[in-house]
Image (tube, coloured by chain):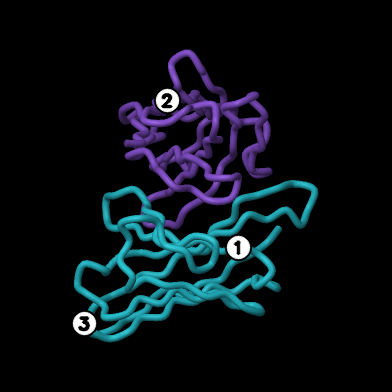
Amino acid sequence: SYVLTQPPSVSVAPGQTARITCGGNNIGSKSVHWYQQKPGQAPVLVVYDDSDRPSGIPERFSGSNSGNTATLTISRVEAGDEADYYCQVWDSSSDHRNWVFGGGTKLTVL
Amino acid sequence: QVQLVQSGAEVKKPGASVKVSCKASGYTFTSYGISWVRQAPGQGLEWMGWISAYNGNTNYAQKLQGRVTMTTDTSTSTAYMELRSLRSDDTAVYYCARVYDRFYFDYWGQGTLVTVSS
C-alpha cells in the first residue's frame, strides 16, 4: 500500500515561515490534501488539490507538490497555527483503493 | 451550513460491538460519500472506509475487512459505522467525514470516543 512520510515535528518562531513536507513515491502524480488538527478538535481541511485553499483559510497557507515531495507552507506563522498537520492522498494504484494519511507533523511555535 | 453530528461516547467490553451514527445536514445527503476515520490516543489519523450515500457501495480498509460495516439511512440523512469483535486497540476517537469528489474530506463530525476496556 502507498506510504506517506512526514517529519514528526517542525518548530518555527512567530512571523517566520514553516514548511512541512510529505514524502511518497511519485507523489507529484497525485493530488495531495492537508489537514490541521488542534488538541481535542476534529481535523480541518486547509489545502486541497496540492495548492487550493477552502474558503475561510488564510492566504498564509499554501501548498506545492512535485516529484516525491509535497510541501505545506505556512507564512508569517502565528501562535494559533500550533497544531498537528496531516497530508492525505487517494491511492488507486492497487486493486484496493485507499485514502491514505501521513503520520502527522506537530508544528510548534516557539 | 454543512454539519455532521455524531452520537455520544461509548464504553464497550472486549468482544462486543459498537455502532456510531453521523447525522448530516445542510446539503443533499445522497450527493456525497461518507468516510470514517479513527484516531487512537496520541496517534495519527487512520482511514477506515467509505460509503456512497447515493447507492450504498462501500470500500473498507483491508485491515478492518470482516469487522466493520458501514451503512446509510437516506430517509434521515444518517450514516452508521459498526465495528465488531472489539479489542483494546480499537480504543479511539471515531470521526465521520464528508468526501468531496471521492478524494478529500471537506467536513468532519465532532468525533465519538469509543473506549474498549474490561
For the residues tagged 3 and 1, is the chain the same?
yes
Query: Which class describes the residues within 10 Å of circle 1: few (<14), some (14-19), or many (20+)?
Result: some
Say above or below: B59 vs A5.
above
Closer to us: B46 or B117:
B46
Alpha carbon distance from label 3 to label 1: 29 Å
Report the residue at 42% width, 40% height from top: B95
Q: Are marks 3 and 2 in contact (CB under 8 Å)?
A: no
Badge 3 element: loop
Q: Which residue is mark 3?
A: A14
Say above or below: A49 vs A70.
above
Q: Which mark is residue B10?
A: none
Q: Position of residue A93 (x, y in %)?
A: 76, 57
Q: Which residue is mark 1?
A: A31
Left-right relation of B28 to B6? right
Left-right relation of B29 to B108? right
Q: Earlier in the sequence, mark 3 or mark 1?
A: 3
Q: Which residue is mark 2?
A: B21
Residue B112 appears in the rendering: no
- Letter of the chain in cyan: A
Q: Position of residue B14 (x, y in %)?
A: 47, 30
Q: Position of residue A94 (x, y in %)?
A: 78, 53
Q: Quadrant of the N terminus of chain A?
A: bottom right
Q: Quadrant of the C terminus of chain A?
A: bottom left
Instruction: Say what amino acid the circle numbered 1 marks.
Output: Ser
**What is the chain letter for disc 1?**
A
- Chain B tint in image: purple
